[in-house]
Protein backbone atom coordinates (compact mmCIF):
# COMPACT_ATOMS: atom_id res chain seq x y z
CA UNK A 1 0.00 0.00 0.00
CA UNK A 2 2.87 2.37 0.85
CA UNK A 3 4.36 2.07 -2.65
CA UNK A 4 0.99 2.74 -4.27
CA UNK A 5 0.46 5.80 -2.08
CA UNK A 6 3.84 7.22 -3.04
CA UNK A 7 2.95 6.86 -6.74
CA UNK A 8 -0.38 8.62 -6.14
CA UNK A 9 1.27 11.50 -4.29
CA UNK A 10 3.87 11.90 -7.06
CA UNK A 11 1.06 11.99 -9.65
CA UNK A 12 -0.92 14.45 -7.53
CA UNK A 13 2.07 16.81 -7.31
CA UNK A 14 2.64 16.46 -11.07
CA UNK A 15 -0.99 17.39 -11.83
CA UNK A 16 -0.81 20.34 -9.40
CA UNK A 17 2.17 21.69 -11.32
CA UNK A 18 0.44 21.22 -14.67
CA UNK A 19 -2.70 22.99 -13.47
CA UNK A 20 -0.55 26.00 -12.61
CA UNK A 21 0.79 26.06 -16.16
CA UNK A 22 -1.05 28.62 -18.37
CA UNK A 23 -0.75 26.21 -21.32
CA UNK A 24 -2.99 23.68 -19.58
CA UNK A 25 -5.57 26.36 -18.74
CA UNK A 26 -5.64 27.40 -22.40
CA UNK A 27 -6.80 23.94 -23.50
CA UNK A 28 -10.26 23.35 -22.00
CA UNK A 29 -10.25 19.60 -22.70
CA UNK A 30 -6.81 19.07 -21.13
CA UNK A 31 -7.65 21.29 -18.14
CA UNK A 32 -10.96 19.49 -17.52
CA UNK A 33 -9.25 16.09 -17.68
CA UNK A 34 -6.52 17.18 -15.25
CA UNK A 35 -9.07 18.70 -12.84
CA UNK A 36 -11.12 15.49 -12.87
CA UNK A 37 -8.08 13.39 -11.99
CA UNK A 38 -6.95 15.95 -9.40
CA UNK A 39 -10.34 15.83 -7.65
CA UNK A 40 -10.32 12.01 -7.63
CA UNK A 41 -6.86 11.90 -6.01
CA UNK A 42 -7.43 14.70 -3.47
CA UNK A 43 -9.31 12.58 -0.83
CA UNK A 44 -6.52 9.98 -0.89
CA UNK A 45 -3.76 12.57 -0.48
CA UNK A 46 -5.64 14.38 2.30
CA UNK A 47 -6.23 11.13 4.18
CA UNK A 48 -2.57 10.13 3.78
CA UNK A 49 -1.48 13.53 5.11
CA UNK A 50 -3.79 13.01 8.08
CA UNK A 51 -2.21 9.60 8.69
CA UNK A 52 1.34 11.00 8.47
CA UNK A 53 0.50 13.86 10.84
CA UNK A 54 -0.98 11.44 13.38
CA UNK A 55 2.08 9.21 13.01
CA UNK A 56 4.40 12.18 13.67
CA UNK A 57 2.39 13.25 16.74
CA UNK A 58 2.39 9.67 17.99
CA UNK A 59 6.19 9.42 17.75
CA UNK A 60 6.65 12.77 19.51
CA UNK A 61 4.36 11.68 22.36
CA UNK A 62 6.20 8.34 22.63
CA UNK A 63 9.58 10.09 22.80
CA UNK A 64 8.25 12.35 25.54
CA UNK A 65 6.97 9.36 27.52
CA UNK A 66 10.39 7.68 27.25
CA UNK A 67 12.09 10.64 28.93
CA UNK A 68 13.15 10.13 32.52
CA UNK A 69 11.84 12.43 35.24
CA UNK A 70 8.76 13.59 33.32
CA UNK A 71 6.29 15.24 35.71
CA UNK A 72 2.85 13.67 36.17
CA UNK A 73 0.86 16.37 34.35
CA UNK A 74 3.05 16.26 31.22
CA UNK A 75 3.01 12.46 31.28
CA UNK A 76 -0.80 12.44 31.34
CA UNK A 77 -0.94 14.87 28.39
CA UNK A 78 1.59 12.80 26.44
CA UNK A 79 -0.35 9.58 27.13
CA UNK A 80 -3.57 11.20 25.90
CA UNK A 81 -1.81 12.48 22.78
CA UNK A 82 -0.31 9.06 22.11
CA UNK A 83 -3.65 7.26 22.55
CA UNK A 84 -5.62 9.73 20.40
CA UNK A 85 -3.10 9.78 17.56
CA UNK A 86 -2.66 6.00 17.63
CA UNK A 87 -6.43 5.64 17.17
CA UNK A 88 -6.41 8.26 14.40
CA UNK A 89 -3.62 6.35 12.62
CA UNK A 90 -5.72 3.17 12.68
CA UNK A 91 -8.83 4.96 11.45
CA UNK A 92 -6.89 6.74 8.67
CA UNK A 93 -5.27 3.48 7.58
CA UNK A 94 -8.69 1.82 7.23
CA UNK A 95 -10.03 4.81 5.29
CA UNK A 96 -7.02 4.65 2.98
CA UNK A 97 -7.71 0.98 2.28
CA UNK A 98 -11.23 1.93 1.20
CA UNK A 99 -10.06 4.89 -0.89
CA UNK A 100 -7.52 2.69 -2.67
CA UNK A 101 -10.13 0.11 -3.69
CA UNK A 102 -10.62 -0.08 -7.49
CA UNK A 103 -13.20 2.49 -8.58
CA UNK A 104 -15.93 1.79 -11.08
CA UNK A 105 -14.83 3.85 -14.11
CA UNK A 106 -18.47 4.82 -14.69
CA UNK A 107 -19.05 6.22 -11.17
CA UNK A 108 -18.62 9.86 -12.21
CA UNK A 109 -20.96 9.60 -15.20
CA UNK A 110 -24.50 10.85 -15.62
CA UNK A 111 -27.11 8.16 -16.26
CA UNK A 112 -30.19 7.15 -18.18
CA UNK A 113 -32.85 5.52 -16.01
CA UNK A 114 -35.52 3.29 -17.56
CA UNK A 115 -38.59 2.38 -15.50
CA UNK A 116 -41.09 -0.18 -16.85
CA UNK A 117 -44.35 -1.38 -15.35
CA UNK A 118 -44.24 -5.14 -14.69
CA UNK A 119 -46.82 -7.43 -13.10
CA UNK A 120 -49.93 -5.72 -11.79
CA UNK A 121 -51.49 -3.90 -14.70
CA UNK A 122 -52.57 -0.31 -14.04
CA UNK A 123 -51.33 -0.43 -10.43
CA UNK A 124 -47.83 -1.28 -11.71
CA UNK A 125 -48.02 1.68 -14.09
CA UNK A 126 -49.07 3.98 -11.23
CA UNK A 127 -46.15 2.73 -9.14
CA UNK A 128 -43.80 3.38 -12.07
CA UNK A 129 -44.95 7.01 -11.80
CA UNK A 130 -44.32 6.94 -8.03
CA UNK A 131 -40.78 5.64 -8.67
CA UNK A 132 -40.14 8.36 -11.24
CA UNK A 133 -41.33 10.94 -8.70
CA UNK A 134 -39.06 9.44 -6.01
CA UNK A 135 -35.96 9.59 -8.22
CA UNK A 136 -36.86 13.10 -9.42
CA UNK A 137 -37.17 14.38 -5.85
CA UNK A 138 -33.92 12.68 -4.85
CA UNK A 139 -32.17 14.23 -7.87
CA UNK A 140 -33.48 17.68 -6.87
CA UNK A 141 -32.00 17.23 -3.38
CA UNK A 142 -28.63 16.37 -4.96
CA UNK A 143 -28.74 19.34 -7.34
CA UNK A 144 -28.96 17.06 -10.38
CA UNK A 145 -30.85 17.78 -13.58
CA UNK A 146 -33.66 15.51 -14.87
CA UNK A 147 -34.51 15.29 -18.57
CA UNK A 148 -37.37 13.02 -19.74
CA UNK A 149 -36.30 11.20 -22.90
CA UNK A 150 -39.29 8.98 -23.59
CA UNK A 151 -42.58 8.24 -21.84
CA UNK A 152 -45.61 6.02 -22.44
CA UNK A 153 -48.30 7.32 -20.05
CA UNK A 154 -51.61 5.69 -19.15
CA UNK A 155 -54.99 7.38 -18.86
CA UNK A 156 -54.95 7.11 -15.04
CA UNK A 157 -51.63 8.94 -14.69
CA UNK A 158 -49.24 6.02 -14.62
CA UNK A 159 -46.44 5.01 -16.98
CA UNK A 160 -46.13 1.80 -18.93
CA UNK A 161 -42.54 2.92 -19.29
CA UNK A 162 -40.50 6.08 -18.89
CA UNK A 163 -36.87 6.86 -19.68
CA UNK A 164 -35.09 9.91 -18.34
CA UNK A 165 -31.59 11.28 -18.07
CA UNK A 166 -30.06 12.33 -14.75
CA UNK A 167 -27.16 14.73 -15.13
CA UNK A 168 -24.76 15.69 -12.36
CA UNK A 169 -21.61 14.76 -10.47
CA UNK A 170 -21.26 11.13 -9.33
CA UNK A 171 -24.80 10.18 -10.39
CA UNK A 172 -23.98 6.60 -11.43
CA UNK A 173 -22.09 5.97 -8.18
CA UNK A 174 -25.29 6.58 -6.20
CA UNK A 175 -27.96 5.20 -8.55
CA UNK A 176 -26.21 2.11 -9.96
CA UNK A 177 -27.66 -0.15 -7.26
CA UNK A 178 -31.24 0.63 -8.40
CA UNK A 179 -31.26 -1.76 -11.37
CA UNK A 180 -33.62 -4.65 -10.75
CA UNK A 181 -37.21 -5.48 -9.83
CA UNK A 182 -38.95 -3.23 -7.30
CA UNK A 183 -42.04 -4.74 -5.66
CA UNK A 184 -44.88 -2.70 -4.17
CA UNK A 185 -47.56 -3.92 -1.75
CA UNK A 186 -50.46 -1.53 -1.26
CA UNK A 187 -54.19 -1.05 -1.74
CA UNK A 188 -54.62 0.24 -5.32
CA UNK A 189 -56.55 3.45 -5.93
CA UNK A 190 -58.83 1.39 -8.19
CA UNK A 191 -59.52 -1.23 -5.45
CA UNK A 192 -62.94 -0.81 -3.78
CA UNK A 193 -62.68 -3.78 -1.37
CA UNK A 194 -59.51 -2.55 0.37
CA UNK A 195 -57.46 -5.57 -0.69
CA UNK A 196 -53.67 -5.31 -0.82
CA UNK A 197 -52.17 -5.98 -4.25
CA UNK A 198 -48.58 -6.84 -5.12
CA UNK A 199 -47.19 -5.24 -8.27
CA UNK A 200 -43.74 -4.80 -9.74
CA UNK A 201 -41.71 -2.39 -11.84
CA UNK A 202 -38.28 -2.94 -13.36
CA UNK A 203 -35.58 -0.31 -13.23
CA UNK A 204 -32.45 -0.15 -15.38
CA UNK A 205 -29.70 2.40 -14.68
CA UNK A 206 -27.38 2.93 -17.64
CA UNK A 207 -24.24 5.09 -17.53
CA UNK A 208 -24.47 7.85 -20.12
CA UNK A 209 -21.67 7.47 -22.65
CA UNK A 210 -20.03 9.50 -25.36
CA UNK A 211 -19.94 8.42 -28.98
CA UNK A 212 -16.25 7.59 -28.59
CA UNK A 213 -17.16 4.91 -25.99
CA UNK A 214 -19.30 2.94 -28.45
CA UNK A 215 -18.69 2.41 -32.14
CA UNK A 216 -21.91 2.53 -34.19
CA UNK A 217 -21.91 2.29 -37.96
CA UNK A 218 -24.62 4.66 -39.30
CA UNK A 219 -25.37 2.04 -41.97
CA UNK A 220 -26.52 -0.29 -39.18
CA UNK A 221 -29.30 2.10 -38.12
CA UNK A 222 -32.87 2.31 -39.39
CA UNK A 223 -34.44 5.66 -38.48
CA UNK A 224 -38.23 5.96 -38.58
CA UNK A 225 -40.42 8.97 -37.85
CA UNK A 226 -44.02 8.99 -36.65
CA UNK A 227 -46.56 11.24 -34.97
CA UNK A 228 -46.18 11.44 -31.18
CA UNK A 229 -49.06 10.18 -29.06
CA UNK A 230 -50.33 10.72 -25.54
CA UNK A 231 -52.19 8.61 -22.99
CA UNK A 232 -54.50 6.11 -24.65
CA UNK A 233 -52.62 6.36 -27.94
CA UNK A 234 -54.28 9.52 -29.26
CA UNK A 235 -52.10 11.63 -31.53
CA UNK A 236 -50.98 14.90 -29.96
CA UNK A 237 -48.87 16.18 -32.84
CA UNK A 238 -49.84 16.60 -36.47
CA UNK A 239 -46.24 16.38 -37.69
CA UNK A 240 -44.00 13.31 -37.58
CA UNK A 241 -41.67 14.65 -34.91
CA UNK A 242 -41.30 11.39 -32.95
CA UNK A 243 -38.29 9.22 -33.80
CA UNK A 244 -37.69 5.47 -33.61
CA UNK A 245 -34.17 4.09 -34.18
CA UNK A 246 -33.49 0.41 -34.78
CA UNK A 247 -29.98 -0.98 -34.39
CA UNK A 248 -30.14 -3.73 -36.98
CA UNK A 249 -27.25 -5.97 -35.77
CA UNK A 250 -28.78 -6.34 -32.28
CA UNK A 251 -32.44 -5.60 -32.97
CA UNK A 252 -32.35 -2.96 -30.24
CA UNK A 253 -35.11 -0.32 -30.58
CA UNK A 254 -35.30 3.12 -28.98
CA UNK A 255 -37.96 5.81 -29.31
CA UNK A 256 -38.27 9.44 -28.32
CA UNK A 257 -41.28 11.72 -28.74
CA UNK A 258 -40.90 14.20 -25.89
CA UNK A 259 -39.65 17.13 -27.99
CA UNK A 260 -41.50 19.06 -30.68
CA UNK A 261 -38.37 18.97 -32.84
CA UNK A 262 -37.61 15.80 -34.79
CA UNK A 263 -33.89 16.61 -34.60
CA UNK A 264 -33.95 16.86 -30.79
CA UNK A 265 -35.91 13.62 -30.53
CA UNK A 266 -33.33 11.92 -32.72
CA UNK A 267 -30.47 13.23 -30.53
CA UNK A 268 -32.15 11.89 -27.39
CA UNK A 269 -32.94 8.54 -29.03
CA UNK A 270 -29.31 8.16 -30.08
CA UNK A 271 -28.20 8.98 -26.53
CA UNK A 272 -30.39 6.14 -25.22
CA UNK A 273 -29.10 3.77 -27.91
CA UNK A 274 -25.46 4.51 -27.09
CA UNK A 275 -26.08 3.85 -23.40
CA UNK A 276 -27.95 0.60 -24.02
CA UNK A 277 -25.27 -0.72 -26.37
CA UNK A 278 -22.56 0.32 -23.92
CA UNK A 279 -24.35 -1.57 -21.13
CA UNK A 280 -24.69 -4.66 -23.32
CA UNK A 281 -20.99 -4.57 -24.22
CA UNK A 282 -20.00 -3.95 -20.61
CA UNK A 283 -22.15 -6.84 -19.36
CA UNK A 284 -20.61 -9.22 -21.87
CA UNK A 285 -17.08 -8.00 -21.17
CA UNK A 286 -17.40 -7.97 -17.39
CA UNK A 287 -19.34 -11.18 -16.81
CA UNK A 288 -16.66 -12.33 -14.37
CA UNK A 289 -16.98 -9.11 -12.39
CA UNK A 290 -20.75 -9.43 -12.38
CA UNK A 291 -20.32 -12.91 -10.89
CA UNK A 292 -18.11 -11.44 -8.15
CA UNK A 293 -20.83 -8.92 -7.29
CA UNK A 294 -23.39 -11.70 -6.87
CA UNK A 295 -24.10 -12.03 -3.17
CA UNK A 296 -22.59 -8.66 -2.32
CA UNK A 297 -25.14 -6.00 -3.22
CA UNK A 298 -26.77 -7.85 -6.08
CA UNK A 299 -25.85 -8.42 -9.66
CA UNK A 300 -27.38 -5.29 -11.15
CA UNK A 301 -29.50 -7.63 -13.27
CA UNK A 302 -32.86 -5.99 -13.97
CA UNK A 303 -34.59 -9.37 -13.41
CA UNK A 304 -33.38 -9.56 -9.78
CA UNK A 305 -35.93 -8.63 -7.08
CA UNK A 306 -34.08 -6.07 -5.02
CA UNK A 307 -36.55 -4.12 -2.89
CA UNK A 308 -40.09 -4.23 -1.48
CA UNK A 309 -42.19 -1.17 -0.65
CA UNK A 310 -44.97 -2.13 1.79
CA UNK A 311 -47.36 0.80 2.17
CA UNK A 312 -49.72 -0.59 4.90
CA UNK A 313 -46.68 -1.09 7.18
CA UNK A 314 -44.80 2.00 5.91
CA UNK A 315 -41.90 -0.41 5.36
CA UNK A 316 -39.14 -0.55 2.76
CA UNK A 317 -36.91 -3.65 2.62
CA UNK A 318 -33.79 -4.05 0.51
CA UNK A 319 -33.39 -7.80 0.05
CA UNK A 320 -29.74 -7.69 -1.06
CA UNK A 321 -28.41 -6.48 2.29
CA UNK A 322 -31.33 -7.41 4.57
CA UNK A 323 -32.08 -3.77 5.41
CA UNK A 324 -35.57 -2.87 6.64
CA UNK A 325 -36.64 0.69 7.43
CA UNK A 326 -40.03 1.98 8.54
CA UNK A 327 -39.55 5.23 6.63
CA UNK A 328 -41.44 4.57 3.42
CA UNK A 329 -43.00 8.05 3.14
CA UNK A 330 -39.59 9.68 3.56
CA UNK A 331 -38.06 7.49 0.87
CA UNK A 332 -40.90 7.99 -1.62
CA UNK A 333 -40.39 11.75 -1.17
CA UNK A 334 -36.76 11.52 -2.21
CA UNK A 335 -35.14 10.69 1.14
CA UNK A 336 -33.16 7.77 -0.25
CA UNK A 337 -29.73 8.51 1.24
CA UNK A 338 -29.95 6.04 4.13
CA UNK A 339 -30.69 3.11 1.78
CA UNK A 340 -28.23 4.19 -0.90
CA UNK A 341 -25.44 4.73 1.65
CA UNK A 342 -26.10 1.31 3.23
CA UNK A 343 -25.74 -0.31 -0.20
CA UNK A 344 -22.50 1.55 -0.87
CA UNK A 345 -21.08 0.52 2.51
CA UNK A 346 -22.09 -3.11 1.94
CA UNK A 347 -20.22 -3.20 -1.34
CA UNK A 348 -17.15 -1.50 0.15
CA UNK A 349 -17.12 -3.97 3.06
CA UNK A 350 -17.35 -6.92 0.67
CA UNK A 351 -14.56 -5.54 -1.51
CA UNK A 352 -12.36 -4.92 1.54
CA UNK A 353 -12.90 -8.48 2.76
CA UNK A 354 -12.01 -9.79 -0.69
CA UNK A 355 -8.83 -7.69 -0.88
CA UNK A 356 -7.78 -8.75 2.65
CA UNK A 357 -8.13 -12.42 1.70
CA UNK A 358 -5.84 -12.10 -1.30
Image (cartoon, helix red, strand yellow):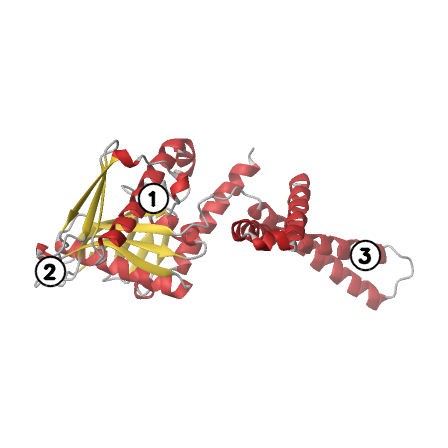
Tag nearer the camera, 3 or 1: 1
In front: 94, or 265?
265
Q: What element carries label 1?
A: helix
Q: Give the image location of residue 30, x and y in percent.
A: 55, 49
Q: Which residue is at the far right? A: 69
User: Which of disc 2 and disc 3 is earlier in sequence?
Assistant: 3
Q: Looking at the picture, does residue 219 appear above or below residue 141?
A: above
Q: In which quarter of the image is the N terminus?
A: top right
Q: Bin the neighbour count of mark 3 within 10 Å (Cα to Cα): few under 14, some 14-19, many 20 and up.
A: some
Does 141 sit left or right of 118 as displayed? right
Q: In which quarter of the image is residue 261?
A: bottom left
Indicate the position of residue 167 as horizontal and vertical percent values.
38, 56
Which residue is denoted by mark 3 in the rendering? 60
Using the numbered discs, state the Cα–Cα distance from disc 3 to disc 2 in whole angstroms: 73 Å
Please tell me whether mark 3 or mark 2 is closer to you in this view.
2
Q: How many labels does the image show?
A: 3
- Element on which disc 3 rests: helix
Identify the residue at horizontal 41%, vertical 40% (top origin).
Answer: 212
Which residue is identified by label 2? 155
In primary-sequence order, the first of circles 2 and 1 is 2
Tag in front: 2 or 1: 1
Q: Position of residue 5 (x, y in %)?
A: 66, 44
User: For the residue carrying disc 2, how many other residues have a C-alpha within 10 Å: few (<14), some (14-19), or many (20+)?
Assistant: few
Q: Are marks 2 and 1 in contact (CB under 8 Å)?
A: no
In-image side of 291 versus 350 (left or right): left
In this view, which residue lies farthest toward the bottom? Answer: 73
Name the residue located 25 percent from the left edge and 52 percent from the top edge: 263
Residue occupying the point 48% across, 42% down: 350
Against 254, is 314 above or below? below
Which quadrant would residue 264 be assigned to in this image?
bottom left
Amino acid sequence: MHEKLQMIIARYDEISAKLSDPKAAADNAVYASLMKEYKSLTPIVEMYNQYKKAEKNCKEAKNLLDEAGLDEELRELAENDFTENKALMGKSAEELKILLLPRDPDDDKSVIVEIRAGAGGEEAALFANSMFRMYSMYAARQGWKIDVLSANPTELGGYREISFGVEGEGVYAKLKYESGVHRVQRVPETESQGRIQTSTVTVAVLPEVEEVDVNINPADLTVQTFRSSGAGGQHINKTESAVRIIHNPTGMVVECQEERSQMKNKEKALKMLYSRLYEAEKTARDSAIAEERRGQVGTGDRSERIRTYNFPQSRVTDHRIGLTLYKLDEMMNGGCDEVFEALRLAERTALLAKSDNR
